[in-house]
Image (cartoon, rainbow, N blue to C red):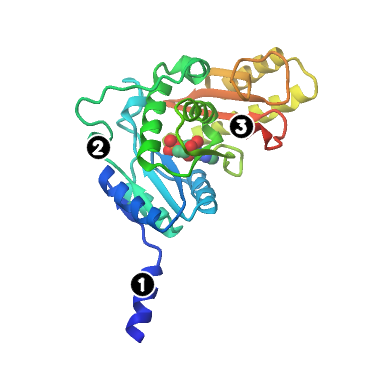
């Protein structure tokens, strides 16, 4: 009798399964599907922080099983970018996922995601050419290709994406709709540090003085949003914001007001408008964004 109780207790203790191959992934998922379980998926590049964990929490509230992937996708990095130095603290990531009761980590090696002969690309269309796309040509093709492939492999009911990468979120929604991928995309709001800096794996690159300067990024967004809401000219506010960032030591790639649905540039405020920024400090490139007006939720429908 005692043995049986222990066996049950052991079975129910949180246990993170780790799959490195598509076959292992599919076997774990098939076993759940037999029992009518629902699955929510969180794709990441690892170096997990509270922002990622918020996505995991959301996933756990959506479905009975949660799958997280960690894959630093070479296709979305240009040769000049930080692919080789991108942080990969895999053991720490596993512990974080295990601690919150995530069910499965899919952590494939590059050759599993891109086997010999892999040649297909998902072109996400015009939304991929503005803002980030203008400064990182090919980036969103790399993102859309890996995310489409992951979504097909995992075939989850839901997949959670952070608004931190707002343009990516909108592009993924477009791709999922256009390719009829049967997974509901669930947006999750940005998690910020106490001083406003959006959490990012790349914040680890910042030296202590750069970390202090970095607060200007979110501060500029919050100040610009307030000014525009108060009726200031969009153009003048964005120019002043860029100057403020330059004074704080940033090299600004863009600071724009855009339509929150299709990301086209705006010169006048409107309901779903969003401020988006990318700027570099030292060798680190950071992005952030902010809705001009509080969102009703319909925005993301
Ligand atoms: P990454 O590992 O940077 O590719 O991010 C994986 C997912 O986590 C993406 O959907 C991101 O938008 C999301 N994410 C990253 N940082 C944050 C954050 N500070 N708040 C909310 N979501 C985030």
Q: Is residue 199 visible?
A: no
Q: Upstream in the sequence, badge 2 or badge 3?
A: 2
Left of 29 or right of it: where is 217? right
Marks 2/3: CA–CA distance: 38 Å
Is there CB contact under 8 Å for labels 2 and 3? no
Locate the N terminus by quadrant: bottom left
Left of 283 or right of it: where is 130? right
Residue 289 location in percent, x, y?
A: 59, 29
Q: Is mark 3 within 8 Å of ligand 1?
A: no
Residue 213 location in percent, x, y?
A: 55, 31
Q: Please name the residue shown 36% across and 79% down the image.
A: 6
Left of 119 or right of it: where is 204? right
Q: Is mark 1 within 8 Å of ligand 1?
A: no
Instruction: Give the number of callouts.
Output: 3
Q: Upstream in the sequence, badge 1 or badge 3?
A: 1
Farthest bottom residue in view: 1
Label 3 sits on residue: 218
Helix, strand or loop at mark 1: helix
The image's mark for residue 112 is 2
Helix, strand or loop at mark 2: helix
């Amino acid at each position: 009798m005692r043995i049986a109780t222990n066996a049950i207790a052991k079975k129910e203790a949180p246990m993170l399964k780790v799959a490195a191959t598509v076959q292992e992934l599919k076997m774990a998922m098939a076993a759940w599907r037999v029992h009518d379980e629902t699955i929510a998926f969180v794709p990441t590049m690892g170096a997990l922080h509270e922002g990622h964990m918020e996505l995991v929490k959301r996933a756990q509230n959506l479905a009975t099983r949660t799958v997280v992937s960690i894959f630093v996708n070479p296709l979305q990095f240009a040769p000049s970018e930080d692919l080789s130095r991108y942080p990969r603290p895999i053991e720490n990531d596993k512990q974080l996922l295990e601690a919150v009761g995530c069910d499965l980590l899919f952590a494939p090696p590059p050759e599993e995601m891109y086997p010999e002969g892999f040649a297909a690309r998902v072109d996400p269309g015009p939304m991929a050419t503005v803002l980030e796309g203008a400064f990182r040509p090919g980036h969103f093709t790399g993102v859309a290709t890996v995310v489409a492939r992951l979504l097909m492999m995992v075939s989850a009911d839901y997949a959670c994406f952070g608004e931190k990468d707002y343009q990516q979120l909108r592009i993924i929604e477009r791709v999922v709709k256009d390719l009829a991928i049967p997974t509901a995309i669930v947006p999750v709001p940005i998690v910020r540090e106490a001083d406003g800096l959006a959490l990012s794996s790349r914040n680890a690159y910042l030296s202590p003085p750069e970390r202090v300067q970095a607060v200007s990024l979110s501060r500029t967004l919050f100040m610009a949003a307030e000014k525009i809401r108060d009726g200031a000219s969009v153009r003048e506010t964005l120019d002043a914001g860029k100057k403020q960032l330059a004074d704080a030591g940033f090299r600004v790639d863009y600071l724009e007001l855009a339509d929150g649905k299709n990301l086209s540039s705006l010169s006048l405020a409107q309901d779903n408008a969003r401020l988006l920024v990318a700027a570099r400090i030292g060798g680190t490139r950071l992005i952030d964004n902010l809705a001009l007006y509080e969102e009703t939720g319909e925005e993301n429908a």
